[in-house]
Image (cartoon, rainbow, N blue to C red):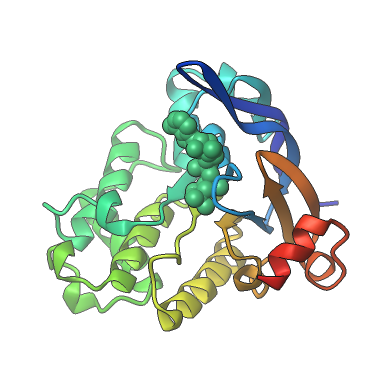
Amino acid sequence: MMKDIIRVDNLTKEFKKKDKTIIALDAVSFTLREGEILSVVGPSGSGKSTLIRCISLLYENTSGNVFFNGTNIKTLKGKDLLRMRKDLSIIFQDPYSALDNKFSAIELIKEPLAFYNKKGLLDKKHTKKEIEDEALSAFRRVSLKESDKNKNIRSFSGGEMQRIGIARAIVTRPKVLLCDEITSSLDMENRASILSLIRNINKEMNTSILFVSHDIKSVKSISDRILVLKNGKAIEIGDAEKIINRPENEITKRLLEE
Ligand SMILES: Nc1ncnc2c1ncn2[C@@H]1O[C@H](COP(=O)(O)OP(=O)(O)OP(=O)(O)O)[C@@H](O)[C@H]1O
Ligand SMILES: [Mg+2]
């Protein structure tokens, strides 16, 4: 049986706004299995980004728990917390705002590796040369031209920038990748190639992936399973083939008709 790498248990997140409370996540429970791609789909405002932010501790949830490899992430401190952050990388929708434009592509990819190396959290202590080599290997893995590695990131196209974001996220060999609408700002051609890149990373590096998208049809080709969210509630979860071809819930059916 496949092991669960992340277990989300009754996760609730409320935002208090003056006189009203927004329930962004409402008692959501599911697991991410080791080695799978689980897509999380749902309309705008359904809580997808909030879910990613709670799992990665960017938001503190209101109630419920998230377990990473069996450990409640709320209990992690110091070095254990840093290790969790290394093992759980996020890729955001908009690479322009996610990447600091003062740096070259390769500098941005090297940075997390150098940071965790300094903290002693890589499998072994890396020399400067080894960091260079690993960063370059991540750069190549996302199909960027080696001769472009020292260019400032402002000189790359949107699709290339997102590849740099992916290289930066995978360079530390995380166990889990959290992808938040990473193809939404791209054209059709770039979307397809980024999806296939994500599938390759999943297969070759055995990375478990939570893939958030508002478009259920676009995740069909890469998902092992699909979770449908609406108004902060988990509506339906199951094998991708089943959810797409024989959805049970009306909300899922409507998403498929859009
Ligand atoms: N920082 C915040 N403060 C207040 N409310 C928030 C905050 N972040 C999210 N929300 C609210 O929580 C709900 C869920 O938002 P969230 O961004 O998670 O949805 P989403 O599914 O990612 O939407 P989209 O597809 O537009 O990215 C929305 O009602 C949103 O307005
Ligand atoms: Mg979002």
How many dots with numbers?
0
- For this rendering, which residue is in front, 184 or 75? 184
Residue found at x 61% / y 59%? 206
Residue 58 shows up from this direction: no
- For this rendering, which residue is in front, 99 or 176? 99
Please identify the quadrant where the C terminus is shown: bottom right
Q: Is residue 193 above or below residue 178?
A: below
Q: In this view, does 200 lie above or below 3?
A: below
- For this rendering, which residue is in front, 19 or 160? 19
Q: Where is residue 44 in the image (x, y as percent from the top left)?
A: 55, 51
Based on the displayed image, in which of its 4 quarters is residue 160 positioned? bottom left
Q: In this view, does 161 lie above or below 6?
A: below
* Residue at the front extreme of this rendering: 19
Q: Is residue 236 above or below residue 166?
A: above
Residue found at x 56% / y 35%? 55
> Would you say 164 lies left or right of 18 here?
left
Residue 101 shows up from this direction: yes
Residue found at x 59% / y 27%? 13
Q: Position of residue 66 (x, y in %)?
A: 65, 30
Q: Where is residue 76 in the image (x, y as percent from the top left)?
A: 54, 20
> Would you say 247 lies left or right of 89 here?
right
- For this rendering, which residue is in front, 102 or 50? 50
Residue found at x 31% / y 45%? 112
Q: Position of residue 228 (x, y in %)?
A: 72, 53
